[in-house]
Image: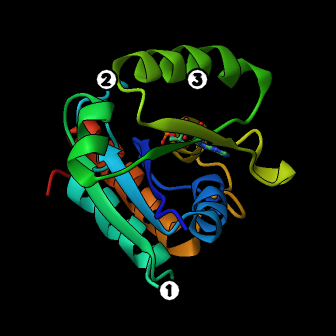
């Protein structure tokens, strides 16, 4: 039997129920799954630091023995080789994800043919869910129930509220 080690890369700012759905599916399929927070993704201003995102991911996956959390910088394929990984796990939500994901998967394959990209679909109720939408709903004071775990919801609300107060300059801590 082959030992399949997969890397699940992303920004996870913050981890959502969609990410967790994929992590559970991946942990059943692969011998080992490394959830890797990309340090160099430019997605505008981050809500959480890499360390905070790691803490939340760790807390949410502690019951999964073959899942570990890490972070990386630079080329994903170089990180895969460094970790002895032979697969990359990515999620496909809507058709809109496909074009970007296809381009990335083919480019990664060109750079490193030993690493295969595997796509998985989340449960339907998560197919419209992204970290960006969670951050936006939180900023506008909307409900996050069912989108992220309760512990993450509390941390998001806390962070957004604190940011808002700081931005007004009235209650700087
Ligand atoms: P986002 O900010 O879009 O949530 P990330 O960079 O953290 O994204 O995503 C990492 C990976 O997880 C990507 O492959 C992305 O397609 C996938 N992903 C994110 N949200 C979901 C979801 N709700 N269902 C399935 N896959 C998802």
Q: Nearer the viewer, residue 32 or 60?
A: 32
Q: Is mark 3 within 8 Å of ligand 1?
A: yes
Please indicate whether residue 135 sits to the left or right of residue 45 in the image.
right
- Disc 2 and disc 3 in contact, CB within 8 angstroms: no
Q: Position of residue 46 (x, y in %)?
A: 32, 37
Q: Secondary structure at mark 2?
A: loop
What residue is at 59 percent from the left and 48 percent from the top?
Answer: 141
Please indicate whether residue 49 sits to the left or right of residue 23 in the image.
left
Query: How many angstroms separate mark 1 from mark 2 (CA)?
Result: 31 Å
Q: Nearer the viewer, residue 132 or 72?
A: 72
Q: Position of residue 169 (x, y in %)?
A: 20, 39
**Residue placed under numbered mark 1 in the picture:** 63
Query: How many angstroms separate mark 2 from mark 3 (CA)?
Result: 17 Å
Residue depth check, mark 2 versus mark 3: number of the one nearer the observer: 3
Q: Which mark is residue 101?
A: 3
For disc 2, the neighbor class at 10 Å (few under 14, some 14 to 19, many from 20) is few
**Residue placed under numbered mark 2 in the picture:** 42
Image position of 42 with respect to 25: above or below: above
Mark 3 or mark 1: name the one nearer the start of the chain: 1
Mark 2 or mark 3: name the one nearer the start of the chain: 2
Mark 1 or mark 2: name the one nearer the start of the chain: 2
Q: Secondary structure at mark 3?
A: helix
Q: Quadrant of residue 136?
A: top right
Q: Secondary structure at mark 1?
A: loop
Query: How many angstroms separate mark 3 from mark 1 (CA)?
Result: 29 Å
Q: Position of residue 81 (x, y in %)?
A: 26, 42
What residue is at 48 percent from the left and 74 percent from the top?
Answer: 60
Residue depth check, mark 1 versus mark 2: number of the one nearer the observer: 1
The residue at the far front in this view is 1
């Amino acid at each position: 039997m082959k030992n399949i080690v997969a890397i699940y890369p992303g920004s996870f700012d913050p981890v959502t129920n969609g990410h967790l759905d994929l992590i559970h599916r991946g942990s059943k399929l692969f011998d080992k799954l490394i959830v890797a927070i990309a340090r160099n993704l430019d997605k505008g201003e981050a809500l959480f630091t890499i360390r905070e995102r790691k803490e939340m991911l760790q807390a949410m996956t502690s019951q999964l023995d073959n899942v570990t959390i890490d972070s990386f910088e630079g080329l994903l394929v170089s990180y895969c080789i460094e970790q002895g990984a032979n697969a990359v796990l990515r999620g496909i939500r809507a058709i809109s994800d496909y074009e970007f994901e296809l381009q990335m998967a083919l480019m990664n394959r060109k750079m490193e043919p030993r690493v295969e990209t595997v796509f998985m679909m989340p449960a339907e109720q998560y197919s419209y869910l992204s970290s960006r939408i969670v951050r936006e709903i939180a900023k506008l004071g909307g409900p996050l129930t069912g989108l992220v775990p309760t512990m993450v919801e509390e941390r998001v609300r806390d962070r957004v509220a604190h940011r808002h107060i700081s931005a007004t300059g009235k209650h700087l801590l």
